[in-house]
Amino acid sequence: MTPRVQVAPRCGQSASPGFPINPPVPSIACPPDLFRRPRLLAAAACLGVLLGCGGGDGGRTEEGGNRQALAAAAVRSAPVVGPGELKSATPIRTVELAAMASVFATVPELGVQAKYAVTTYRLTYVTKDGDGQDVVASALAAVPVKPAGRPSPVMSWQHGTLFLDAQAPSNTANESEAAVLLASQGYIVVAADYVGYGASKGRPHPYLLSAPTAAAVVDLLTAAKTWRATSGVVDNGQLFMAGYSEGGYATVAALRSMETTGSPHLANLVGVAPGAGPYSVTATMDAALAIVRQRSELLRWVAWPGVLKNLSTTTRTLLRDALVHEILPDDADVTLTTSFIDLYLADDTAALDALSNVHDWRPTWPVLLHHGRDDRTVAYSVATRTIATMRANGSTSASLTDCPVQPAGHLDCVVPYFSFLLSRAAGAARDL
């Protein structure tokens, strides 16, 4: 069992420092925050510091049951056809150790160095788009260059919102790409481009729609497993999942889908560590609306949750345009589906719960949330609502940790988030 170090929790923070094997110490609720234009990870990606996390090696939890028994029960499945089917695997490049070392040198506060050169591949696989139709999507696979036959843990990395297709993981695949930097630490990393990027560019990206978002991640895990089995890439049976901002949302959506369907990938899962994600789209939009009210004299008196459906068509159109402007920059070359905004403006909370929200359920695998109290891109109230709801549903495996820097804004907390993840990885992931 991974050693546990107990520390006094701060506001919103669990005392459990790693993927918890035992129920975590309850977090302390904190005041809500506001929202601002969600450029998400665009600026942070330029820093080249988007790494990932590790975790424990499993065991028995109060909720999760005997994972070793679950792993032993997993059997090799027949070749996959349809969602999860591997279509192709194409080598991209090998990123040398020195290139990544120069990136890590710019963020000494992480306290890590590149350990391996990394070979990258572009995988294509079948998943579902926002309309539920099969589509061929792409992803980046990044493999640390280790001695032949030496295994590695697998990390599923989910990227934040991107507005340019060129920034998708399989279109980047260089020393500043999160998945590559993570692989340099010893993980086999798979990073979905998501539908609407890479091989599926031109299709709308199903932004904050939980089912296709989860499918892009889970179907990649299936396809990547096939690829490893046929290419001689050896994993050690551990699976970790992490992501920041939209990537945090995608991570939680994928875990919920896996637990709901009894996915065979649960046999290998250690835990997930989402950062600053809009898990409650309703709460995220409430905070966005507060900002819109501050900026518009006309909307200040009429744009309130619960009365939006009663507004005139002209006013609702004005409000919708203002909210979309909070999301999409003028130079975007990808299309984001923003149907969740229409549902929100119609006060259709049932549809938002069914199609977008991923906070209201009972996770049984460890979920380590991380969020900044000053975050105005994805309000801190989203994280506190999520942890409170999960615990009200009976979860003892979810925890929330505060970003420790001041100010603790969305981009301010990118490096602390990865520092948090890397510290949780110490002594947990095997074969790094």
Image: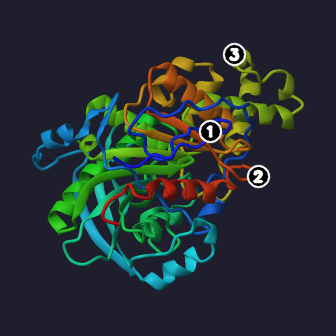
Residue at mark 3: 306
Of circles 1 and 2, the one toward us is: 1
Mark with earlier residue (1, 2) = 1
Residues at marks 2 and 3 touching, judged by CB atoms closer than 8 Å = no
Residue at mark 1: 9
Q: Nearer the viewer, residue 262 or 201?
A: 262
Q: Dividing the picture into quarters, in which one does residue 259 lie?
A: top left
Near mark 3 (Cα within 10 A), the count class, few <14, some 14-19 or many ≥20, is few
Near mark 1 (Cα within 10 A), the count class, few <14, some 14-19 or many ≥20, is some
Q: Is residue 153 left or right of residue 35?
A: left
Dividing the image into 4 quarters, which one contains the C terminus? bottom left
Q: Amino acid at mark 3?
A: Gly
- Image vertical order of residue 306 relative to residue 269, above or below: above
Of circles 2 and 3, the one toward us is: 2
Q: Secondary structure at mark 2?
A: loop
Residue at 32 percent of width and 29 percent of height: 260
Q: Position of residue 221 (x, y in %)?
A: 30, 51
Q: Position of residue 228 (x, y in %)?
A: 21, 62
Residue at 42 percent of width and 83 percent of height: 96
Q: Secondary structure at mark 1?
A: loop
Residue at mark 2: 406
Alpha carbon of mark 1 to alpha carbon of mark 3: how far? 36 Å
Near mark 2 (Cα within 10 A), the count class, few <14, some 14-19 or many ≥20, is few
Q: Position of residue 209 (x, y in %)?
A: 48, 36
- Image vertical order of residue 286 relative to residue 419, above or below: above
